Every structure is written in C-alpha cells, then in structure tokens.
Image (cartoon, helix red, strand yellow):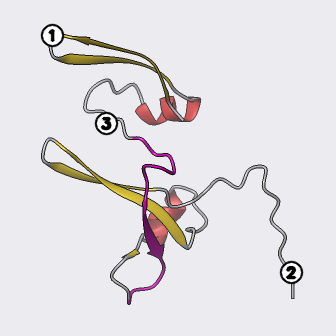
C-alpha cells in the first residue's frame, strides 16, 4: 500500500510525496494526471456489503468474466466499502478479496 512521505501546502495547492509498491506503480502505467488517492484501511472502509446472488439490497455483484480477467478466483462473503465524493463525482471503493498470504487455509476434502 502507498504511504505518504511528505506533504507541502503552497498557494492553495497540496503537494504530496508518495512511496508506492511495485504493483501500484504497474497499475499507474506511466499515467501522471487524473489520479485519485483514497484511504483504504479498516477505519475508512466501514460499510459492509454482501457478495453473492440477488435478493438483498446491500449486495454487490461482479461479472465472473471480469473477475477471471483480473485473476480473482472468488469474492469474500462480507466486504468493506465506502463511497467518496470528489468534485461532485462519486467513487465506490470496495475491497473484494483479502490477501491469503501467510494465513494457512485448511479445508476438509470429501
């Protein structure tokens, strides 16, 4: 995750120096404008959505082909989210899958 290294305010503008991971740098793909910075910790993503089939008003649905193209094997059942309003535009940030690195997962085979 990105980390702010320094913040400077001059003439009504805010300049931020960031430290980002290789994955985040790859996602930027040399783009230097039209970027948004969102906090994504537990204290920010406070509204829980449910993934799965239709039938409840707080469900989030993502097409299988879209998930497969991004190599996401499945969604967590309860996912944290938040809506951010920036310059009149609304952005929905959802953490659809937690990393499973370092957490062994034991399943019973039948």
Question: Which one is nearer the viewer's eye here, 48 or 62?
Answer: 48
Residue for badge 1 = 11
Q: Are marks 1 and 3 in contact (CB under 8 Å)?
A: no
Q: Position of residue 21 (x, y in %)?
A: 56, 29
Q: Is residue 23 above or below residue 110?
A: above
Q: Residue at x 55, y 68 (%)?
A: 75
- Of marks 1 and 2, the one in the foreground: 1
Tag 3, which secondary structure? loop
Looking at the image, residue 72 sits to the left or right of residue 60; the answer is right
Tag 2, which secondary structure? loop
Sequence-first tag of 3 and 2? 3
Q: Residue at x 41, y 32 (%)?
A: 28
Residue for badge 2 = 108
Sequence-first tag of 1 and 2? 1
C-alpha gap between disc 1 and disc 2? 61 Å
Looking at the image, residue 99 sits to the left or right of residue 23; the answer is right
Of helix, strand and loop, which mostly describes the magenta segment? loop
Write the start and end of the magenta stretch as one range. 39-55
C-alpha gap between disc 3 and disc 2? 43 Å
Sequence-first tag of 1 and 3? 1
């Amino acid at each position: 995750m990105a980390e702010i290294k320094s913040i400077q305010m001059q003439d009504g503008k805010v300049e931020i120096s960031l430290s980002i991971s290789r994955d985040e740098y790859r996602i930027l793909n040399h783009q230097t404008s039209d970027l948004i910075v969102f906090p994504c910790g537990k204290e920010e993503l406070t509204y829980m959505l449910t993934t799965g089939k239709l039938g409840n008003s707080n469900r989030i649905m993502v097409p299988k082909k879209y998930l497969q193209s991004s190599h996401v094997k499945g969604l967590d059942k309860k996912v944290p989210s938040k809506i951010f309003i920036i310059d009149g535009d609304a952005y929905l940030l959802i953490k659809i899958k937690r990393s499973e690195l370092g957490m062994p997962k034991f399943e019973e085979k039948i």
